Image (cartoon, grey):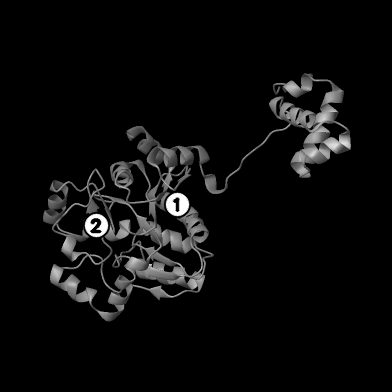
Amino acid sequence: MPRPREADRRGPAWQVQAASLARRFHLEGRSKTEIAREFGMSRFKVARLLDEAREHGLVEVNITLPTRIDDELSSRLRQEFGLSRAIVVDVPDTSAGALRSQLGGVAADLLAELTSEDAVLGLSCSRTIAATTDALTRLARCTVVQLTGTLAGPDIEAGSVESVRRAAKVGGGKAFPIYGPLVLPDGATARALAVEPSIRQAMERFAQVEIAMVAIGAWADGTSTVWSTVGEAERASATRAGAVGEIGGRFFGQDGEPVKTRIDDRILGVTLPQLRDVPEVVGLVYHPHRAAAALAALRGRLVDTIVTDTGLARRLLEAS
């Protein structure tokens, strides 16, 4: 049998009076002053009875967030790392596809919430960003700029070009895509593409970006967008240089500071110093195996807002 509430032990007169006051206050939206006038009692007595109704279980307040957002973990993470926002999503299925899909849905709503008319929005290239724009159903009319070259593959469709075009279509704004790979064969090719008119137009707008949404990758197989696109020598070189994570192919160490690697001059896209100049950077990252990279990005203030899952959020709090 259910445990009796404290309110059930109170007399019927108290129950009726407290319930009547609670109904008017919580359901009808009446003020305490209005209720006091109706019942011929002081405002302070109304307040006391409303408090008693909650304390004794007559009134229960439930806060229900959509899409399994964990508000407690979100608040702890935001406070611990001094973030503008932290959104922690509870995803029971910890497979990569499920995590990307759930985080993408929440990130899409966040993007719609943060982006204003005539803003300049920047998007990096990743599977999580693609999942975000797939889930996007509303967006203010804004300019959408591609922050990195495209990383095409069997599970990312056409990469960030499609993500940028999709976001611009939803909002009805203008898109500035980068029709070029994220990682080029050599520095000379990267420099040549950077001055190509359409690509130059996009890159010239990096300094105008007001909100950027990027994915945080860990420097390991299966957790980075560029790991499989470079050779073993480049991977080893980046590891020796102290790289623990990357954003758009730009590497950073445990302190979140940029790490110089042999791959740098082959990357087509925004640099970490340019990203730090963006007023609001939203970082998407999931799964505890990216904990070192996520922690470094937070320590280095590379992102202002983080969207993550409960498993990684707990790991970050433990590590801090």
- Residue depicted at 42% across the width and 46% down the height: 308
Could one spot residue 285 in this view of the protein? yes
**Amino acid type at mark 1:** Leu
Local SS, label 2: strand
Which of these two is toward me, 187 or 204? 204
Foreground tag (1 vs 2): 2
- Residue depicted at 85% across the width and 31% down the height: 41
- Residue depicted at 40% across the width and 37% down the height: 80
Pointer 1 and pointer 2: residues touching (CB < 8 Å)?
Answer: no
Q: In this view, does 229 lie to the left or right of 17?
A: left
**Amino acid type at mark 2:** Arg
Q: Is residue 88 left or right of residue 40?
A: left
Question: Marks 1 and 2, Cα distance to the nearest angstrom?
Answer: 23 Å
Which of these two is toward me, 241 or 31? 31
Local SS, label 1: helix
Q: Name the residue under label 2.
A: 250
Which labelled disc corresponds to residue 65? none
Which of these two is toward me, 229 or 125? 125
Could one spot residue 186 in this view of the protein? no
Q: Mark 1 points at which residue?
A: 103
Residue 317, percent across and down?
Answer: 38, 35
Q: Which of marks 1 and 2 is nearer the N terminus?
A: 1
Image quarter where the N terminus lies is top right
- Residue depicted at 40% across the width and 47% down the height: 95
Residue 100, percent across and down?
Answer: 41, 53
